[in-house]
Amino acid sequence: MTEKNVSHTKWMKRAIFLACLGKNTTSPNPSVGAVILDKTGKLISEGFHYKAGMPHAEAMAFNNLEKDAKGGSMYVNLEPCCHQGKTPPCVDKVISSGIRKVYISIQDPDKRVSGKGIKLLKEAGIQVHLGLCRKESLDLNKAFIHRNISKKAFGVLKWAMSIDGRIGLKNGKSKWITNEESRSLVHSFRAEFDAIIIGGNTLRKDNPILTTRGLKTPEPLRVVFTKSLDLPSKSNLWDCNNAKTIVIYDSSTANESYLTRIPKCVEVEKVSSDNPELISKILARRGCNKVLWECGPRLATAAIQSNCIQEIITFIAPKILGGENSMNPLGDFEFEEMHEIIKLSDSQVNLIGNDICVKSSFKN
Ligand SMILES: NC(=O)c1ccc[n+]([C@@H]2O[C@H](COP(=O)([O-])OP(=O)(O)OC[C@H]3O[C@@H](n4cnc5c(N)ncnc54)[C@H](OP(=O)(O)O)[C@@H]3O)[C@@H](O)[C@H]2O)c1
């Protein structure tokens, strides 16, 4: 790599670092950072996008400018927007600033922008370089990209299990398999998500709270998917003071007379079947880029089968539950041959005290 390339990579890495400052707060928008250098190559401003409705990274960088950007360059990890959204188009600002070179890591998958922002910059006589730190930028905004392309939320399935692969005893008891450190890690980890999904049975059995315990404001949306609507009239999820809850039910099977058990502060929406894809699409339409499935085996299996899951996070505790009828994390996929089984990739392993946390991706 030449000295020049090293320096371009350095500035793009800085833009990505800035983008990460808004990592958990920008949905439905992407995480973006921008750096502006003057014509001599000196850093004169930077910015990042923090929240939808607030300035985009490029706009914040222009607002923070210490001196004229004329003849300078910009590094930004996503193609600048060219449409009027909640804020004005960034491309216009770049063009009117007199900047001569723009380094863009990846194209915006949003159809309103994709390629059009770059075209406008080029038409204005600006040199555009696409592809610097592409892999890092794709990874940073993988959930945003997935939602834009598939119209479904990027799904992560999480479960906690014993070393013999059990998530609970046959009577449904499962508190607690993992250690305190792993459990508090889950609270902070939830802050990365826009919504957390469980099935009706997990609500009935565990009565979970499903919050970050105040680490994120607003808390992720809590989602209950039910076929029966047979939910209790008392539940931690019905307390809407700290977090919102939505119950989504399959109207082809639910007994709607049970709706009276759900308090007014909880949103209710019906769907036409029990296909988890419907949940993923509803949440994507509501602007959720990334959602966490914290459900039990039956809904988890259906979610995998309907391609709603892109990553799996498993916490494994050095404990043995044993027993043929203890609960497995997943149900039967009816595989007959080993070549049919699901193979995951890109595994990362971490030790959390005595527990092991494994994160793997689906090859979509
Ligand atoms: N260790 C762990 O990490 C962990 C995590 C989560 C849960 N659990 C345990 O798992 C047990 C519950 O397991 P579960 O499998 O019944 O989980 P679940 O999360 O309650 O999912 C199943 C429920 O989801 C609803 N549902 C909607 N669409 C569905 C579909 N297409 N397929 C299947 N269900 C659908 C139904 O609710 P309705 O019955 O209301 O119609 C169904 O009973 C609990 O004992 C809990 O403690 C353990």
Image: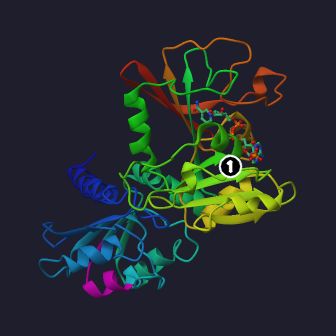
**Point 46% across, 61% down: residue:** 241
**Point 22% across, 54% down: residue:** 7
Decide: few, some or many residues near mark 1? Use Cα within 10 Å; few <14, some 14-19, many ≥20: some
Furthest-bottom residue in this view: 96
The x and y percentages for residue 337 are: 82, 22
Image quadrant assignment for residue 309: top right
Magenta stretch prevailing secondary structure: helix
Picture quarter with ligand 1? top right
Identify the image quadrant of the C terminus: top right
Q: Amino acid at mark 1?
A: Pro
The x and y percentages for residue 89 are: 41, 83
**Point 16% across, 73% down: residue:** 38
Q: Nearer the viewer, residue 254 or 60?
A: 254
Q: Nearer the viewer, residue 350 or 1?
A: 350
Residue at mark 1: 232
Image quadrant assignment for residue 21: bottom left
The x and y percentages for residue 116 are: 51, 77
- Residue 364 makes an appearance in the image: no
Q: Magenta region: which residues?
A: 92-101
- Residue 157 makes an appearance in the image: yes
Furthest-right residue in this view: 252
Image quadrant assignment for residue 19: bottom left
